Amino acid sequence: MASMNEKDYYAILGVDEGASTDEIRKAFQQKARKLHPDVNKAPDAEEKFKEVSEAYAVLSDDAKRRRYDAMRSGSPFAAAGSYGGTSGRGDPFAGGSPFGWGFPFGGSPFGSRGATRSRSYNPVAGSDVVMDVTLDDDAAKAGAKRGVTYQRYVACEACHGKGSVEADHAETCPTCGGRGHINVDLSGIFGFGVMEMSCPECEGTGKVVANPCESCGGSGRVLSASELVVDIPAGSHDGDEIRVKGMGNAGTNGSSTGDFVCRVRVPSEQVNAYQSFGFRLLGFDAPFVVFGALAGVLPAMLVYVVIMFAFGVFMIVRGGGLGRSSRWWKNAGTAFVNGFVSGLFIALVMVSMFSCGSSLGRSGYTGTSLRG
């Protein structure tokens, strides 16, 4: 088999050396459709299909493409690859393998999903759109209406969310035959062997949109600006949520739409990060006091207990002191309980250690007493 630098992968795909990743992807899809053994019955179709797949596997990966270009130019450093952008300080392998291997030692050779929309048929429910609305005490008590403008994905009007204007149903992917993956022989690339890769045509789903809609590219949704008036009820508190059904992001290929979620924020009821940490620390300290007192070893642990208590109080004061509303105290109590639960096990272990040490000390003193 010809080695990696003996093949002109650009010529195999029919693209220029400066072609973008999107151009390389489109060129592969066009050739793969024509050369797939299930479609093309020519004797050499399978071999050409493997060759095209191999070319795409190399040129679609930035690291392997740089290495391939360097090998073609005769660079003696081509095999060394990239060090992940290190500046010469710290770990030179922090950015990845010293050989620049993105695949198969991490990541996909086809890049992250969603960077370039293909015609894959992949119905996924739309996500919620979450926004915070801040109210003062009076508005939260009396209730309020707030108008919001936001961006979200909506169903494509041209294809009514299906992804195709002409076809009602998806079709089997012509590149992978519905399997969702293709096998590529990379034996010439440092002995990688045969690799199973996610099909770039259907992105692993096994189905593609027939005649993708030009407006949405086959996804069935487009980005749009939406306006909404949210009715916040009287007596709302910090952290309350108002959900508006069907006003979130539309799903792909006709799938369900998410909701719009308005989260109420009332500053006077919020326990900030300093205060929350302080109350968690006081809660963490509480089990040491309780178990230490019950076991009779609290004086031995007094230094640890006092330091934690003092630091907890300091953080609360630094955060602005104590709040006035009942909801603020409820949030503070939640932070205290979380800290208490976290400190239970550690307090039990430390109290046991102090108790054992105290018992051993008394036993040792008695055992070494002198007799007349």
Image (tube, grey):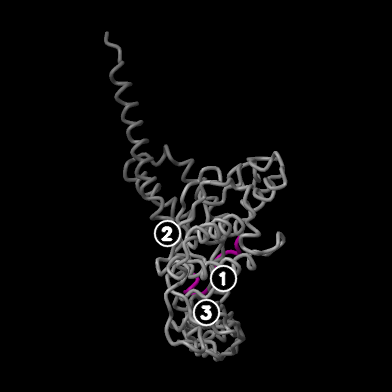
Provide the residue designation for mark 2. Answer: 338
- Answer above or below: position of 218 versus 357: below
- Answer above or below: position of 275 versus 96: below
Q: Which residues are magenta?
A: 319-328
Q: What residue is drawn where x is 63% and y is 48%?
A: 6
In the image shown, does 171 or 13 lie closer to the viewer?
13
Question: Could you say which quadrant of the image residue 356 lies in?
Answer: top left
Q: Quadrant of the C terminus?
A: top left
In the image shown, does 123 or 372 lie closer to the viewer?
123
Q: In this image, 113 relative to 73: left or right?
A: left
Residue 69 visible in the snapshot:
yes
Q: In front: mark 2 or mark 1?
A: 1
Q: Mark number for residue 30?
A: 1
Q: In front: mark 3 or mark 2?
A: 3
- Answer above or below: position of 371 versus 344: above
Residue 143 visible in the snapshot:
no
Q: Earlier in the sequence, mark 3 or mark 1?
A: 1
Report helix, strand or loop for mark 2: helix
